[in-house]
């Protein structure tokens, strides 16, 4: 199990860089955490480290946003918060995204737990009392 502490927002890209170093080779990430824990912010930092040039925002209404890393690798950012039925996820071509070889970053994966692949890396983000964040995986 890995653990990274993010003391403040100015350290987030360093934390994202270390996270990617420690999870090298992983392509499917499931981010768990309470509302406001910093899932989208951390995913945005991960995308920045990957060289995504676009602004990264939570795809709450579209379910998935697609970006490109600087090396051309597709990066898919999912937000399953508003999912009510698993068929909604299957209808967007979820399995094709997973099989694409791109990087899949998922928020609110607990909504689709039974669809997560076996090799998914479960990542928990917790806001600590002092305002820092702890990322465990």
Image (cartoon, rainbow, N blue to C red):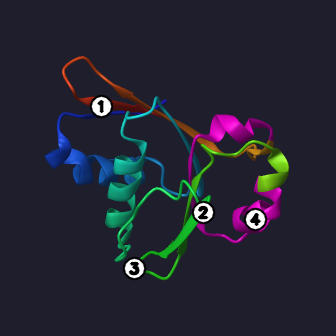
Q: Is residue 101 above or below residue 133?
A: below
Q: Is residue 23 left or right of residue 134?
A: right
Would you name the residue on which mark 4 appears?
Answer: 92
Work out whether mark 1 precedes mark 4 in sequence or the reverse, and give the earlier one. 4
Q: Position of residue 121 (x, y in %)?
A: 59, 42
Residue nearest the observer in this picture, 15 or 111: 111
Work out whether mark 4 precedes mark 3 in sequence or the reverse, and give the earlier one. 3
Q: Closer to the camera: disc 1 or disc 4?
A: 4
* Count of marks overlaid on the render: 4
Would you name the residue on which mark 2 appears?
Answer: 62
Residue 51: quarter of image: bottom left
Would you name the residue on which mark 3 appears?
Answer: 70
Secondary element type, mark 3: loop
Q: Is residue 72 above or below residue 117?
A: below
Q: Residue at x 28, y 21 (%)?
A: 128
Q: Position of residue 137 (x, y in %)?
A: 49, 34
- State which region is magenta: 89-114
Work out whether mark 1 precedes mark 2 in sequence or the reverse, and give the earlier one. 2
Q: Position of residue 95 (x, y in %)?
A: 79, 61
Q: Closer to the camera: disc 4 or disc 3?
A: 4
Work out whether mark 3 precedes mark 1 in sequence or the reverse, and give the earlier one. 3
Q: Closer to the camera: disc 3 or disc 1?
A: 1
Residue nearest the observer in this picture, 59 or 95: 59
């Amino acid at each position: 199990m890995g653990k990274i502490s993010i003391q403040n927002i100015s350290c987030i890209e360093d934390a994202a860089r270390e996270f990617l170093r420690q999870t090298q080779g992983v392509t499917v990430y499931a981010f768990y955490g309470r509302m406001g824990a910093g899932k989208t912010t951390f995913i945005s930092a991960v995308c920045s480290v990957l060289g995504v040039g676009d602004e990264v925002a939570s795809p709450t209404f579209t379910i998935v946003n697609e970006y490109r890393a600087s090396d051309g690798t597709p990066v898919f950012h999912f937000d399953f918060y508003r999912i009510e039925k698993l068929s909604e996820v299957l209808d967007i071509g979820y399995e094709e995204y997973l099989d694409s070889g791109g990087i899949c970053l998922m928020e609110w994966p607990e909504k689709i737990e039974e669809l997560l692949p076996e090799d998914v890396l479960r990542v928990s983000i917790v806001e600590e009392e002092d305002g820092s964040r702890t990322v465990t995986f």
